[in-house]
Every structure is written in structure tokens, then in C-alpha cells.
Image (cartoon, rainbow, N blue to C red):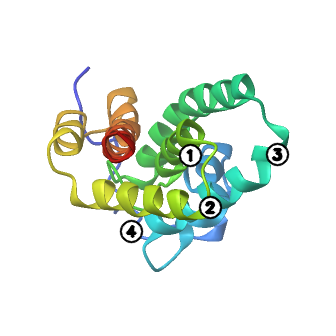
Amino acid sequence: MHSSMPETTAAPLARPTWAFLLSHPAHFIALGAGAGLSRWAPGTVGTLWAWASFLLLQPVMSASTWALLIGAGTLLGWWACTVTAQHMRIADSGHIVWDEVVAFWLVLWLIAPAGFAAQLIAFVLFRFFDAVKFGPMAWADRTFKGFGPRGGFGILLDDFAAAACTLLVIALWRF
């Protein structure tokens, strides 16, 4: 699929508003129920939202329920991120945080049971890999940039690469 700009002459939406968030279900999902509206480090705020929601859900979720939520969240997020990027006219806005949410849920689920210190280390590692974007994160970010389903997939993919690197470091550390 060829990546191109959506057919519009309007300027990109540099910073989404509450009205934008509530104007479409995809926006609400992609912007992390409002976490992505943060003026300060929306990706970090989205990851903190993921962590808080994980802690709230963890007591009532089984491993298979987490697998279903993360799988469904990935597919729903692919659609939501694709639509929101097109509506914002920005291929991968930092305000789209659903990618951080679902990827960090994966990290927390796979390191569970883990205490606060281990979760904090996972948080710091994940944010590092997501922000620095070298190696697999850079490849995913570069290769799948654009609009449409390919671009929406790319929004998610670089965060799953950051999750994989986080899990690799944690596995080596535990070993």
C-alpha cells in the first residue's frame, strides 16, 4: 500500500483538544481516553495510564483475559490509530498514545507477578526504548511511516519493538 497524505488542504492538528477527543470513538481510543492530551510528554502520560489501568485490572484478570484484551486492543488500536492519524493529518503524532498503552500492558503482563521496583524498572526501560528509537524501534518507525493501515500498524509496531527490547533486558537481568 502506498503511503500518502490524506486528501485535504487543511493544516495538521498539532495539538488535539477535548472536542477532538470526543468527536470520534477512534480519537478517544487512540488518545488514551485523554492521556494523549497532556501538554507534557504525552507518551509518558499514556504509559503511566497503562500502568495505572493494569494495576486496577490485574486483580480481576486471568492470563487468558489479558491475552484477549491485548490482542483485541492491538486490533482495535490499529484501526483507531489509523483513523486518528488521518484526521490529525500527522503520520505518528506523539499525542496518539494507545500504542504505549497496549505495548506496556504486554510488558507488565509478561513480567507478572512483579513488585513495584520491577514494574518501575520496566517503565523506565520501556520509556527509554520508545523515546530513543534505535535499532528495531528506528526500523519500525522508518519502514511503516505514513497514512492508512500501514501507517497505523507502524504507530503500534515501534512500541511493540520497545516492549520486546524491554522484555529482553529484563530477561537478561533475571538470568
110 sits left or right of 136 in the view: right
Q: Report, in whole angstroms, how far the alpha carbon at label 4 lies from the one at label 2.
A: 22 Å
CA distance for labels 1 and 2: 13 Å
Task: Tell me which numbered mark, 4 or 1, is placed earlier along the sequence.
Answer: 4
How far across and how far down the image is residue 34, in percent?
A: 64, 64
Q: Give the mark nearer the N terminus: 3 vs 2.
A: 2
Give the mark, 4 or 2, whose residue is nearer the N terminus. Answer: 4
Tally of numbered discs: 4
Q: Is residue 12 visible?
A: no
Return the residue at label 2: 49
Circle 1: element type: helix
Choose mark 1 or mark 2, whichever is in front: 1
- Please give left or right for residue 143 compared with residue 79 in the image: left
Instruction: Give the labeled residue for mark 4.
Output: 14
Above or below, 23 against 149 in this view is: below
Residue type beneath disc 4: Ala
- The residue under label 1 is 108
Q: Between marks 3 and 4, how big is the CA–CA gap?
A: 38 Å
Judged from the image, the secondary structure of the residue bearing numbered disc 3 is helix
- Give the spatial CA distance, label 3 vs label 1: 13 Å
Q: How crowded is mark 3: few (under 14 residues within 10 Å), some or many (20 or more)?
A: few
In the rendered view, does 123 fall on the left or right side of 9?
right
Tell me where residue 15 appears, x and y as whole percent: 45, 71
Q: How far apart are marks 4 and 1 (CA)?
A: 31 Å
- Which residue shows up at 67% across the image and 55% down it? 23
From the top left corner, tell me how far across and down residue 51 is, in percent: 61, 57
| Quarter of image, res 160 | top left
Specify whether residue 91 is in view.
Answer: yes
**Residue type, label 2:** Trp
For the residues marked 3 and 2, what is the alpha-carbon distance in whole angstroms? 17 Å
**Is disc 4 in contact with disc 1, using a CB cutoff of under 8 Å?**
no
Say above or below: 45 vs 159.
Answer: below
